[in-house]
Amino acid sequence: MKQDKYALNVERALFNWYYSGENATPKPVFNAVQEGLKNDMQVLVPIEMPDIVSKTVKNPKQIKVGDIITVEEFAIKLYHLPANEQGKYFIPLFTSEEELNKKGAASVINQSLKELFEAVGLWKDCLGFILNPWDKKLMLSKDVIKIIVSYQTISQLSFVKGSVVDMYVDAIVNAANKSLLGGGGVDGAIHKAAGSKLLDECRKLKGCNTGEAKITKAYNIKYADHIIHTVGPIYSGKKQDADLLSACYKNSLDLALENGCSSIAFPGISTGIYGYPLAEATKISLFTVLQWFKEHPDKIMNVYFCCFKDSELEAYNELTGNI
Ligand code: AR6
């Protein structure tokens, strides 16, 4: 069963929300759910075997693919997760078979999330849904559903302590060098995780100029689809450094958009081996991304700044605390 693209985006946003720590905003998740509602996102809903089917079919294990079973009436009962002793319950929903299988498989149907949200008001004892209840879950009580349904999507920038390699996004950004043939720092970590096929594709790109960006597949990096390789400036203290660093962020975002991405994770480009002072680099990256959001008001992009070192997160905290 191929996973619904919008369900995958929700699953990814949920993972990153948990990964970002307890103070992280759920807005990237709300963005992804809202986009799903607008685009008829399908979720998996476990069902109980209807009584009528078990009565009609003496031994369900003997049913073969292609057999036709005729039953007089067929009412599907969605699986319930009891919430209390008064009979209140939640309905579990899943974004993928992988999420479902984290705790035993069940019979499932595909269902439109929008239609489920519309129906829940009619089910008196149902308190709402739990999306991906076995792992990184989203509680969708009736009140939360109301908030999400009327939520105005807007691009989001989040700060995460960790490596871009671990992010669940459409594209991760690599701080590469002009050859695009790998190196140390995050470049080395990305090539190691993606495997040798990445190097094969990079060879065909014939390098990249400072400030520009090129895109490849993510190969063995399972939770991202693309890698965007950009080349930051080697810090020289000259005025052009800032323009080139800003161009890296802008060109990466443009390329992500051109390739249908709605989530992207950046490392601190040029702030490692290329020696760009953190305080200046964080300011440039932050303002460039916010400016890009302003210039693309009709596009929804969830952007994550991955801070591999504590000092990077501290630099962003200082900056955002002062805005
Ligand atoms: N995993 C994740 N992030 C990392 C890692 C890692 N293993 N190591 C560093 N970072 P850098 P640059 C973060 O030095 O300054 C390469 O050799 C780091 O904390 O990787 O742009 C290239 O081939 C920082 O946020 O890149 C180039 O020659 C960010 O990655 C040169 O380094 C960038 O640090 C590029 O230098």
Image (spheres, grey):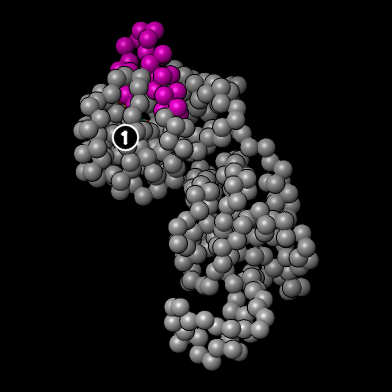
Circle 1: element type: helix
Mark 1 lies within 8 Å of ligand 1 (Cβ measured): yes
Q: Is residue 282 left or right of residue 188?
A: right
Q: Is residue 155 above or below residue 54?
A: above
Foreground residue, 19 or 45? Answer: 45
- Above or below residue 181? Residue 166 is below
The percent coordinates of residue 314 (x first, y second) are 48, 29
What quarter of the picture does the N terminus occupy? bottom left
Foreground residue among 141 and 255:
255
Q: Is residue 253 magenta?
A: yes
Query: Is 181 one of the magenta-colored residues?
Result: no
For the point 60% across and 89% down, the residue is 55
Amino acid type indicated by mark 1: Val
Magenta span: predominant SS is helix
Rendered-image quarter of ligand 1: top left
The residue wearing badge 1 is 186
The crowd level at tag 1 (other Cα within 10 Å; few <14, some 14-19, many 20+) is many
Q: Which residues are magenta?
A: 230-254
Corner quadrant of residue 236: top left
Name the residue located 58 percent from the left edge and 86 percent from the top edge.
54
Residue visible at 56% across and 58% down? 43
Work out whether residue 300 can be spotted: yes
Q: Vertically, is 219 above or below 109?
A: above
